[in-house]
Amino acid sequence: MNQEKGDDLLPGSDLVREGLADLEKGKMSESALLVLIASPRLRRLGIEIPQAEHSQPFEHQLYELLEERLGAGAHSHYNSLIRRIVSYARALERERSARKT
């Protein structure tokens, strides 16, 4: 199962949609790395995430990309992205749980 239509309304769905599209193309973008960071949780929720090769943790790769682009602002942006993907996963968990009842 990939992202469902109703999932587009959840906070952070844009990042997940972009990340999944980039992973399908083999592109390791910020969004793709963020999806890979959250992949264990997202897979448990039924989202199919392509496998990706990695030489170092995805968290480190994401931080390095952000640092190249933002310099000293990388830390706060990294934390913001992590909060958004966690928010998405929590909202998706609530939505899927509500559908079951």
Image: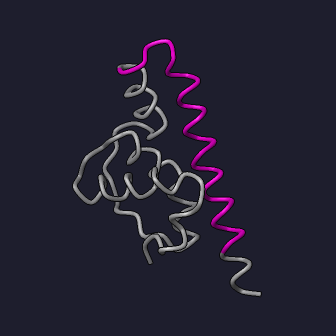
For the N terminus, give its image quadrant.
bottom left
Relative depth, front residue between 81 and 50: 81
Give the quarter of the image for residue 89. bottom right
Q: Nearer the viewer, residue 56 or 20?
A: 20
Name the residue rendered at 74%, 79% in the picture.
98
Q: Residue at x 33, y 41 (%)?
A: 29
Q: Which residues are magenta?
A: 69-95
Residue lying at the far front in this picture: please name it. Answer: 9
Q: In the picture provided, is 6 more to the left or to the right than 27?
A: right
Q: In the image, 68: left or right of 80?
A: left
- Magenta stretch holds residue 98: no
Question: Seen from this angle, which residue lies furthest left?
Answer: 25
Location of residue 99 with respect to 52 vertically, above or below: below
Residue at left offset 44%, top offset 41%: 58
- Rendered location of residue 73, percent (x, y): 51, 17
Where is residue 94 drawn, in percent x and y?
72, 69
- On whether residue 74 falls in the magenta region, the answer is yes
Q: Residue 36 at what x, y percent from top left? A: 44, 51
Characterize the magenta stretch by its predominant secondary structure: helix
Residue 83 vertical position relative to residue 46 in the rendered view, above or below: above
Farthest-out residue, bottom = 101
Rendered location of residue 13, percent (x, y): 51, 57
Closest to the observer: 5 or 52? 5
Q: Is residue 71 above or below residue 27?
A: above
Q: Look at the image and tell me in which quarter the C terminus lies.
A: bottom right
For residue 17, which quarter of the picture?
bottom left
Above or below, 78 relative to 18: above
* In this rendering, position of residue 68 left or right of residue 73: left
Q: Which residue is drawn at the image coordinates 54% and 73% (left, top)?
A: 6
